[in-house]
Structure formats: structure tokens, C-alpha cells
Image (spheres, coloured by chain):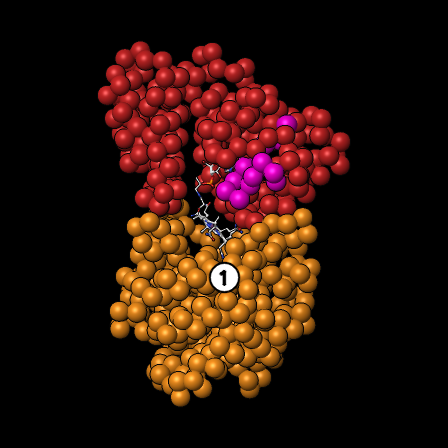
Chain colours: A orange, B red
Amino acid sequence: MTPTELTQRLRDRVLLLDGGLGSYFIAMGLEQGRAPEAWNLEHPEQVIEVHRRYVDAGSDIIQTNSFGASPPKLAASGLEGRCAELNLAAVELARKAAGASALVAGNIGPTGRFLAPMGDATEEQLEEALREQASALARAGVDLISIETMYDLREALAAVRAARDTGLAVLCSMTFELRPRGVFTIMGNRLVPSLQALRDAGATAAGLNCTVTSDAMLTMVEQTREQASLAPVVAQPNAGQPIATPSGIKYDADPDRFAADIGRMLRAGARVVGGCCGTDDAFIRATRRAIDTMVSADG
Amino acid sequence: MSDLFRELGQHLYDGDAPGVIELTRKAIEQGLDAREILNAGLLPGMERVGRDFKDGELFIPEVIVAARAMHAGIELLKPLLARGAGPASRKIALGTVKGDLHDIGKKLVGIMMQGAGFEVIDLGHDVPPERFVEVVSTLKPDLIGMSALLSTTMPMMKNTIEAIRAAGLSGKVKILVGGAPITQAWADEIGADGFAPDAVGAVECARRLL
Ligand code: B1M
Ligand SMILES: [Zn+2]
């Protein structure tokens, strides 16, 4: 799907992404500290099963299990040199689950390497690494590329440049916190200028994901409302905050409240929505209902 | 003199390592006590960084750069601190638990511990329980400090304590835990010896335990 085609489609309708993959895998037995991408080869049927839940819940776009499948991130989890192989497997599994019902977005996350002054990586190095992953996803036949959870605008821009050059449509979300002085990434990048920079670099749609709950993300999305050049906006909040209990991790949000907040985000200009950490098919199903009710009410 | 300390704290806050080195040298040359240079100059600067980060005034790059400047200052003071009347040199091994890559807070704890005269072994981040066990049996630290920043890695502290216990080493070492989501109640639940909410508290707690 080209950028123009996605832009066209978003003019006509809202697109629903999927929710988190990680918490499903942990519940299915993924060990602490193990890279979820390894499951593309070791437990393909489980990966398909999770994707399928989201397709059944009504996702228009599902995202491949390749968030950590850039070469530097794989090297850090003991999977050095397996970028092409793991991304290809990720796409095949998502495609199997999607069938003709959903689009497949090749998912890209941060490399885990830091630019100065935090670390010694250069923007060129990161772009090259991300380019390797983006091309692997494109070669494997994804419909579009989704970049998520970026916290340093410089790395996010490197990812957008790498993804854009595949010719596919690109979604790019960064993760922001609400601070007394405004909305920032942990590196100090401000919300509106960041989204503008991502769009200028070639993202078909830019937005926010992870870190915050739906009510906080609604406040953030509302700040993009006056900025026509940012539309369409992407929004994928977490399912509340993680709480450690003796029996495991719990998230405290309620699917219907989450979906209601998403409804408000759509009114504030979001066009691509979904869930991040802690969300499951119940959240996506509730969000599907909220979108469909809005469409029938409006139309 | 207090002007010199104030200036030192400001250069540290600004993350100006060369400035911190120069002023620390100057203070040493003036014959000021190393402990006082640390306590009245460097530490207040770093505490202000921590506070302003919490309040949303500073971001991660500023915290990192300030921590580096603090480290540069401590390196100059270390030989003098070792000679002073600090706590009898005790060994502390610090690490962020397995699955967790957050190491900024743990580094600050290490810097403060060094400043307080402890010998610090930094095990890095993503440290598996087996590695902690190995360190306890081979390097024989007096205290193990574990850091976790994710709710999802908090349980790894429990696994690590259990591994140390299973190896029959629990009487040999004190265990201190910390990190943003950690509470005293959690420390009690997993059987840690101590908990500290921040780096200054970690030093106090280590002193109390040893
Ligand atoms: C031994 O005894 C002791 C005693 C005291 C001890 C101690 C040990 N250890 C610490 N202390 C205490 O003393 C220190 C000094 O006063 C204090 O240490 P702190 O570490 O608390 O404070 C530091 C000085 C400064 N604080 C920090 O350094 C953490 C800051 C925030 C912004 C943060 C950062 C920087 C990062 N992150 Co992460 N990150 C966040 C944080 C949100 C925030 N605004 O706080 C948090 C912790 N991260 C989070 C998440 C979810 C994640 N992060 C991730 C990644 C990262 C970066 C790599 C980008 C980066 C870490 C870089 C690095 N080298 O450390 C991912 C996980 C990676 C992994 N496997 O670990 C990822 C999962 C994001 C994602 N979706 O990919 C959240 C955790 C939520 C939760 N409760 O579980 C989070 C609260 C952000 C949020 N609001 O959602 C005290 O806690
Ligand atoms: Zn998330």
C-alpha cells in the first residue's frame, strides 16, 4: 500500500490496529528476558493464534511480531545476524492470520542503542540498521510499516527515512509523558513539533503509543487537534499501569472505559487507533464496537 | 569557600565535566576536606538533578551528563576519601535484574556508594540470578544491591533472592533493593534486608545493614 493509498483510505474511514503481543506470549510461557521474536521460529502456531484473536476482534491492521527484530536489538538478545530470517517469519505468520480480513503492518521498534550524549551510536548507524529491517519486512511482503515506541526523535526520524524508502505507507508513533511543562518524550522532544518532523520526513501518519493510559493519551491527542497539518493522528494507549502481584503482572484498565476514551480521541482527530502494553482482544473488540457505533451515529 | 561549593554544584547540575574537574582540583588544592567537597559540593548538585528530573524540569540526557560529571569529580576524590575516616572498606555488588535494561538509577546509587567510601562492583544491567549467585560466592561482597524499574521485572528480584538462598549463600550477604516501582512492602514480601527510595537513602541503608 502506497502512502497515497493509505491517505485516501484514512480520509474515508478510521483504521483499527491490534493490541499488545508481549503479555499474551508471557501468559503462554515466554520466559522473562527472552526475545518474543524467537517465537516466530520456535512457536509459530502460538504467534498465529495471538494474531488471529485480533483479526477476530475486528482489527483492520495487525502488526508483525518484529518490534525487536532490528539487527542491534537482536544482537543484544543473542540472535545476532538473524534479521532477515526472523522478519520474514514474522510476516508469514501475520499473513496467515490476516487472510483477506486485515492488512499486515511490519512492526519496527527502537534499536536499543543510544545517540550522544547518552551513547555512542550515530544517526547513520541507526538508519542503516533500521533500513536492513525495513527492507526485510518489505521484501517479505508487508502492506505497510508501523514504527512504534520511539523515545528519541532522531532515531524515529532515521526509522521513518528507512521505512519511507521502501515505497510503502509508514505509521510512526513515539512515546510521550505528561509533564508539568507539557507533553515530552523522555529525551525532551515536544509532542507537536515531533509529529510535524515525522510527517515532514515522510511518515504517512504519526502519533503516540505506550507509556500512558487512555485518559492521559486523550489529553495529548487533544493538543494535536488545532494542528491540521498533523492529521491523521495515530493513538495506541496502554491498558492502565502495570501492577506487580504475587501471581503476575496485572493492568488496571477496563476495556469499555478504554474504548470510550478512544472514541473521544477519534473526535479529536485520531484516525488510526489501537492498544499497546497490557491490551488484549477484549480491548480491541470494545474499541471496534465504539468505532462502529460512532460511524453509524455520524453517518 | 561556600561559593566554590555552590559553583561546583552548579557545574555538575549543568553536566559540565571539565568544569567539575577543574573546581574539584581547585578545592583539593585549597586543602579542603575531600568528604566536604563531596557532601557540600557534588552531592547537592546531583540531588538537585534528581529532584528536577522527578518534577519534569530535566530530561534523561541531562541526568546522564550530570551523572558523568559527578563521576569525574568522584574519581579525583576517591584516593583522598579512601584515606579519610569513611566506613571501613566494604564491598557492594550492584546490578539491574534480568530482563531490565534501566541502569541510570543504579549507576547513581553506585556513584553515591563510592562517594561514601564503599568499594563498588557494578554488574551492569540485565543481570541473571545465576550471575548474582556466582558473584556472591566468588567475589564475596558484603552487600548485593538490586535495581528494577519495570513492574514486569520486579518478580525477578524474588527469583534472585531465592537463587541465592538455594545456593546456601543467604547468610553470607545482605540484600538491598530499589527502583521506582519498589516499595518497603515489596522488599518485605520477597525477603530483602533493606529498601531505599533513592541513592542517598541507599547509602544510609547500606551503612545501617553493614
Ligand atoms: C540497590 O538499591 C537500590 C536503591 C535505590 C535505587 C536502586 C537500587 N535503583 C534505583 N534506585 C533509586 O535511586 C535512584 C536515584 O534516586 C532512583 O532510580 P530511578 O531509576 O528511579 O531514577 C533515575 C535516576 C532516573 N530514571 C530513569 O532512568 C528511568 C526514566 C524513564 C524515563 C525510562 C528510561 C530512561 C528508559 N526506558 Co523505561 N523508562 C521509564 C522511566 C520513566 C520516568 N519518567 O521515570 C520507565 C521505568 N520505563 C518503562 C517502560 C515500560 C519501558 N522502558 C523501556 C526502555 C527504556 C529506555 C531504554 C529507553 C530508557 C533506559 C535507559 C537506561 N540506560 O537506563 C522499555 C523496557 C526495556 C527493558 N527491558 O528494560 C519499556 C518496556 C518501554 C517499551 N514499551 O519498550 C515504564 C515502566 C512501567 C512499569 N511500572 O513497569 C516507565 C515508568 C515509563 C512509563 N511511564 O511507562 C531510585 O529509584
Ligand atoms: Zn507499550
Does B181 lie within the magenta span?
yes
Would you identify the image quadrant in which residue B72 lies?
top left
Would you identify the image quadrant in which residue B1 lies?
top left
Looking at the rendering, the stretch of residues picked out in magenta corresponds to B174-186
Would you identify the image quadrant in which residue B49 lies?
top left
The residue labelled by disc 1 is A238
Quick check: can you spot residue A44? no
- Residue B92, position as x, y percentages in the image: 56, 27
Does A264 lie within the magenta span?
no
Question: Assess mark 1: CB under 8 A from ligand 2?
Answer: yes
Quick check: can you spot residue A222? yes
- Residue A225 lies left or right of residue A20; in this view the side is left
- Give the residue displayed 60% in from the left and 27% down from the top: B143
Q: Toward the viewer: B68 or A271?
A: A271
Which quadrant of the rendered structure holds the N terminus of chain A?
bottom left
- Give the residue displayed 66% in from the left and 39% down from the top: B189
- Residue A166, position as x, y percentages in the image: 40, 75
- Give the residue displayed 67% in from the left and 65% down from the top: A42
Circle 1 Cα neighbour tier, 10 Å, few/some/many (<14 / 14–19 / ≥20): many
Q: Is residue A275 above or below residue A7?
A: above
- Residue B74 lies left or right of residue B135; in this view the side is left
- Residue A83 lies left or right of residue A128; in this view the side is right
Which quadrant of the rendered structure holds the C terminus of chain A?
bottom left
Q: Amino acid at mark 1?
A: Asn
